[in-house]
Amino acid sequence: MRELLLITISGKDKPGLTATITSVLSRYSIPILDIGQSVIHNHLSLGMLIEVPKESASSPILKDLLFTAHTLGIEIDFSPITTKEYHQWVGEQGKPRYLLSLLGRKITSEQLERVTTVVANHGLGIDTISRLSGRVPLEDERDPGTGKACIEFSLRGAPQDVDRFRAELLDITDSLGVDIALQEDNIFRRTRRLVVFDMDSTLITSEVIDELAREAGSGELVAAVTEQAMRGELDFTESLKKRVATLEGLEESTLQKVAERLQLTEGAEHLFRNLHRLGFKTAILSGGFTYFGRYLQQKLNIDYVFANELEIVDGKMTGKVTGQVVDGKRKAELLEEIATKEGIRLEQTVAVGDGANDLPMLGKAGLGIAFRAKPIVRETAKQAISTLGLDAILYLIGFRDRDALEA
């Protein structure tokens, strides 16, 4: 009768350790059914599930392994596995799995305790925990507000109530100032190819219409209308027309003046350099204005820009926009049109935005991310980033800091 054994090894890592252990198994022609290894601060943890053929006896194998472990100065343990347990493990193959990303300026034990408790309460197991962010020296002198950390959990199983699971994770983000993203672990997560962005308060830190309104002397009125629209309390097209009407008579030269003082959001340049070096297509889908979208396109090497066109006659704004308004519905349509043109499945797309008019495209994209968003958007979108910069998106599509092609 075949014998199944789980071998667990721990101790200080050294070159050739795994090769030495597996050479013992090789002498007995032992099949390896599963294997996993991790190293944290030069301390190795190695697990192997082996099958001892019925024509072999396990005693000589275990004796040789124990002797080898002793000479290497490591701990080794053996646990028998029943065939029933093995078949249950095999039966889990192909079932949904999830990836949970914990993002913050710094990861704390309280955050880990809260997250892992919720995971356990929903009946999920944790297979692996990986650090995606880079190593930080103890004497790190960076501003605490600019640091970034990300830990990714690979979860086994599926919660019975995904919405409740997400709601409980959201409670943690609200109380501990951390972001938590939950994605199904599938092939599309590893093959994203198109990332589209809202512009105002997403790629840049301000709302351009508010900046233009200050120049026109209608700042307070426009800011109030903008806030209503972003909270979803006012139809976007109606709000756009009301705000743009206050710009009537403003000199065209004001556009350049405003563009030059726009501030990119934290992490934007790092994100775009890496996305383009990795072959991603990028786009701005904005309810703002084409002039500023083109300005950012040149700055960040963006592939597509779709926004609203301000009407200008005799060098002055008329207080109107021309052409089809880019509202929430149009953003979702444009996402699909670009994906089709590039031969990219919607499941391979990422959409990033902060306002209510971004929700249609966030819902249509394979990965929709509410970035530093209004409460209604953050609660509705499946993913949200509020504590880190735009380059945290790289973590959600599976990149580690050490993968970065450009710092």
Image (tube, rainbow, N blue to C red):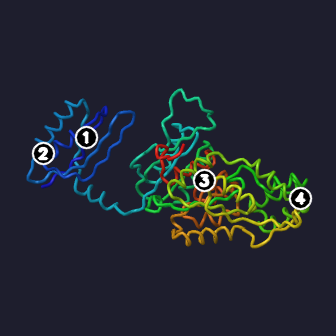
According to the image, label 3 marks what residue? 384
Q: Which residue is mark 2?
A: 27
Q: Give the answer, above or below, for where 360 lies relative to 254.
A: below
Given contact means CB atoms under 8 Å apart, are the residues at marks 4 and 2 in contact? no
Residue 286 vs 170, above or below: the answer is below
Looking at marks 2 and 3 on the same chain, the residue that comes earlier in the sequence is marked by: 2
Whole-angstrom CA distance, mark 1 to mark 3, is: 40 Å
Q: Amino acid at mark 2?
A: Arg
Q: What is the spatial separation of the Cα atoms under label 4 and label 3, in whole angstroms?
A: 37 Å
The reply, left or right, for residue 359 in relation to residue 405 is right
- 368 vs 61, left or right, is right
Q: Tell which residue pokes out farthest to the top in this image.
A: 139
Q: Earlier in the sequence, mark 4 or mark 1?
A: 1
Image x and y of residue 321, in percent: 81, 68
Quadrant including the C terminus: top right
In the image, which is nearer the foreground, mark 1 or mark 3? 1
Q: Which label was assigned to residue 18?
A: 1
Amino acid on which the number 1 mark rests in the picture: Thr
Q: Secondary structure at mark 2?
A: helix
Q: Position of residue 268 (x, y in %)?
A: 62, 49
- Rounded to the nearest angstrom, the CA distance separating label 4 from label 1 is 71 Å
Residue farthest left in this picture: 55
Determine contact: label 2, label 3, CB under 8 Å: no
Could you tell me which residue is drawn at 58 percent across and 29 percent down? Answer: 141
**Residue ID for mark 4:** 250
Hey, what amino acid is under mark 4? Answer: Leu
Residue located 68% across and 70% down the image: 330
Tell me the distance, in whole angstroms, between the alpha carbons under discs 2 and 3: 52 Å
Q: Quadrant of the N terminus?
A: bottom left
The amino acid marked with disc number 3 is Ala
Q: Earlier in the sequence, mark 2 or mark 1?
A: 1
